[in-house]
Image (tube, helix red, strand yellow):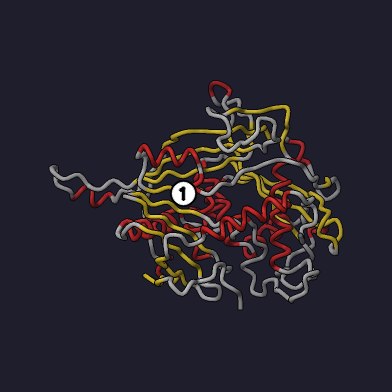
């Protein structure tokens, strides 16, 4: 039995319940998007990491970089898009990918939805599930909370560890001497001299207008246009001599992590140090089964961003009993759509889910709503909540973050 990701208040009102069976039957075709704006910069990927293997492993370094993952409504670029009426719906790639892959999820999560004028904005709560990476969410016997705060293999400790690994792997596998600048500077940078992480923000517009409605509409009455602007992210660049003008292609970077193949919740994982080089396919198949939701989301995020490749790192603990030191055992590249196909991720189903939720929101009056995944059932609940919900919580999280910044974030249990 798991706890909910958010406390349901007594004044929350349930508007709908949607089971995963209904979600899996939805479909909607979306055309290729248009790029609206690009911000930030990316460093070029260091190809020497493609030669890493279990006999030539590298230590995962702790690198000081700042990466912003600001929620949708706090994004200054999106705020301007809303003011200028550039789209109907606004979201980030992480929020949209979770919604598109929601039938695969087992752990609880929630999305905050603001209906303002004729606009819909999908938001995350600070300190919520979007800021952390899950581990073995989809195993038949997932990691369990034991009540022991020193248990490094509990779901919360593993999530903190995996989040740390993903951030620092992406920081490490780039060449800081080579940089590709996007059209505009990083929109979130506070200080001119802060060490920013390699990250390109690509704002892309998708057309969610129902084609049947457009075809059936009279010439005198235009159909309601529904467009969606998504802030997507790419992590690095790769030189491509085949493209004119020296333009690179872009990749996303993520890390799979092994904690202890003998521990509870390991999901019958193979020992990577022994099997990764010779039985890579078996290792990947096990990860696809144990982490179906996480890997599907990564693939969808890469597709939304128009990334040419997904780069996955295989990272293990230097010692299974120590969650502070890690080794990189290998890397692998995938084309996002091919990887999604291997996992039976259907983009039309994902867009069908998004379209259904957006249409439901557009029929509702102005206000604040929350979409909540039940912690123990395959059900989504749609709540209407008071307009000031989470505002005090957000202020409390900001105070905690200021205190956390004073500490050294090395121990994954902290």
Q: Is residue 231 above or below residue 411?
A: above
Front one among 347 and 142: 142
Instruction: Name the image quarter holding the C terminus.
Output: bottom right
> Does residue 200 appear in this view?
yes
Residue 50 is at least partly visible in this image: no
- x and y, in percent, of residue 261 in the image: 78, 66
Residue 266 to residue 246: above or below: below
Dot 1: element: strand
| Position of the N terminus by quadrant | bottom right
Q: Where is residue 227, by image quadrant?
A: top left
Instruction: Determine which residue is flagged by label 1.
Output: 91
Could you classify mark 1 by the number of other residues whose Cα lies within 10 Å: few (under 14), some (14-19), or many (20 or more)?
many
The residue shown at (63%, 29%) is 239
Q: Residue at x 51, y 40 (%)?
A: 306
Q: How far across and down, in percent of the image, does residue 80 sit?
A: 43, 37
Residue 118 percent coordinates (x, y) = 31, 50
Q: In terms of image quadrants, where is residue 360?
A: bottom left
**Residue 27 place in picture, x, y as percent:** 38, 58
Q: Residue at x 58, y 40 (%)?
A: 234
Looking at this view, is 92 or 267 the one in front? 92
Residue 237 lies, with reference to residue 96, above or below; the image says above
């Amino acid at each position: 039995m798991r706890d909910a990701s958010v406390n349901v208040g007594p004044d929350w009102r349930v508007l709908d319940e949607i089971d995963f069976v209904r979600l899996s039957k939805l479909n909607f075709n979306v055309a290729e998007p248009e790029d609206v704006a690009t911000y930030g910069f990316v460093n070029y990927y260091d190809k020497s990491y493609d030669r890493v293997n279990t006999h030539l492993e590298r230590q995962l370094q702790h690198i000081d970089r700042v990466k912003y993952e600001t929620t949708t409504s706090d994004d200054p670029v999106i705020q301007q898009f809303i003011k200028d009426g550039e789209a109907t719906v606004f979201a980030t790639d992480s929020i949209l990918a979770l919604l598109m892959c929601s039938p695969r999820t087992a752990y609880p999560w929630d999305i905050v939805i603001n209906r303002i004028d004729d606009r819909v904005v999908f938001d995350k709560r600070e300190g919520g599930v979007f800021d952390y990476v899950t581990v073995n969410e989809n195993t038949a016997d997932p990691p369990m909370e034991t009540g022991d705060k020193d248990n490094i293999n509990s779901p919360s400790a593993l999530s903190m560890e995996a989040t740390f690994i993903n951030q620092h792997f992406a920081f490490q596998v780039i060449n800081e001497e080579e940089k590709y600048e996007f059209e505009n500077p990083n929109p979130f940078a506070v200080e001119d001299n802060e060490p920013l992480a390699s990250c390109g923000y690509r704002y892309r517009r998708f057309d969610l207008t129902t084609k049947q409605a457009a075809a059936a509409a009279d010439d005198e009455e235009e159909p309601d246009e529904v467009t969606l602007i998504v802030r997507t992210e790419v992590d690095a660049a790769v030189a491509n001599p085949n493209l004119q003008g020296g333009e690179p292609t872009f990749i996303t970077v993520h890390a799979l992590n092994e904690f202890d193949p003998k521990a509870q919740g390991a999901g019958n994982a193979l020992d990577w140090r022994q099997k990764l080089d010779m039985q890579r396919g078996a290792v990947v198949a096990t990860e696809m089964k144990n982490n179906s939701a996480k890997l599907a989301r990564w693939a969808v995020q890469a597709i939304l961003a128009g990334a040419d490749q997904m780069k996955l790192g295989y990272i293990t603990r230097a010692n299974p009993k120590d969650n502070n030191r890690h080794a990189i055992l290998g890397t692998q590249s995938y084309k996002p759509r091919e990887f999604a196909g291997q996992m039976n991720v259907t983009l039309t189903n994902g867009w069908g889910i998004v379209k259904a939720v957006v249409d439901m929101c557009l029929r509702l009056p102005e206000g604040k709503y929350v979409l909540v995944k039940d912690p123990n059932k395959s059900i989504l609940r749609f709540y209407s909540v008071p307009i000031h919900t989470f505002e005090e919580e957000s202020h409390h999280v900001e105070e905690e973050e200021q205190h956390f910044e004073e500490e050294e974030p090395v121990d994954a249990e902290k």
